Amino acid sequence: MSTSAWSSAELAAVEAAKARYLAARAAVNEAVKRPGDVSASALALAGNGGTWLPRVEAVLAFSVKNGWYETGDARITMLAVRAVKLDLAQPEVRLTSCIDSSAVVSRYRSNSKPIPVVSDNGDRHRFESRLIYTKSAETGRRMWILVDEQTTKTC
C-alpha cells in the first residue's frame, strides 16, 4: 500500500509506531552492552513487550550467565511499512527493517577480549516486526508496543 493511499489516522499511526520501534530497538541495543544492569521494566517502558520481550530477556540472561557483553551499535539501515490495520481490537502496524550489526562485537566481561564468532549468515539481517497499540502494563497508558520480531533473511 503506498503512503498516498493512507488516511491521516493511518499516517499518524505509522509515524508513532516507527518512533516507538526505534526507541524499543535502541533500548535493546543499550541493554546488550550491560546485560546484567537492565530490567524488563525499563525495556517495557521503551516499548518492548509481547513475545519479543521474553526473547530479549533470554539473550540478556545468556550473556550474563556466560560473562558476555557487546560493544558497538547495530544500525537500522532500512525501515518500511508492510501493513497498517487500525480496525482491529488492538490496532497493528507491521514493519520490515534491515539491521546492520557489523559494528557490534561480543566480548568477555572478564578481559574485554572479543569472543571468537564463526558465522556464515552475515551482518545485515531483515526483520519482520509487529507493533500493537495497547495499554502499557508499565504506565497504564495506551502506546505502541513492539510485540514480535522475526528475522526472515539477510538484506
Image (cartoon, rainbow, N blue to C red):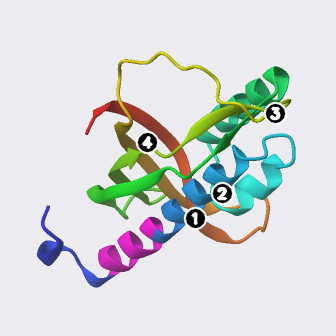
**Labels 3, 1: front one:** 3
In reply to whether residue 49 is colored magenta, the answer given is: no
In space, the residues marked 2 and 1 are separated at their CA atoms by 6 Å
Circle 4: residue type:
Ser
Q: Name the residue under label 1.
A: 23
Determine the CA span between mark 2 and mark 3: 20 Å
In this view, the residue in front, 19 or 65, is: 65
Mark 3, other Cα within 10 Å: few <14 / some 14–19 / many ≥20: some
In this view, the mark in front (2 or 3): 3
The label on residue 109 is: 3
The reply to whether discs 1 and 4 touch (Cβ–Cβ < 8 Å) is: no
Q: Are marks 3 and 1 in contact (CB under 8 Å)?
A: no
Query: Left or right of 74: which side holds 78?
Result: left
Can residue 51 be seen by looking at this rendering? no
CB atoms of marks 4 and 2 within 8 Å: no
- The spot of residue 30 in percent (x, y) is 68, 54
Q: Evaluate whether residue 10 shows in this view.
A: yes
The residue singled out by tag 2 in the image is 27
> Which residue range is magenta in the image?
9-18
Q: In this view, does 42 lie above or below 63?
A: below
Q: Main secondary structure of the magenta part?
A: helix
Residue under pointer 4: 102
Mark 4 residue crowding within 10 angstroms, few (<14) / some (14–19) / many (20+): few
Q: Residue at x 55, y 54 (%)?
A: 25
- For label 2, the SS is helix
Q: Residue 86: x and y, percent?
A: 37, 64
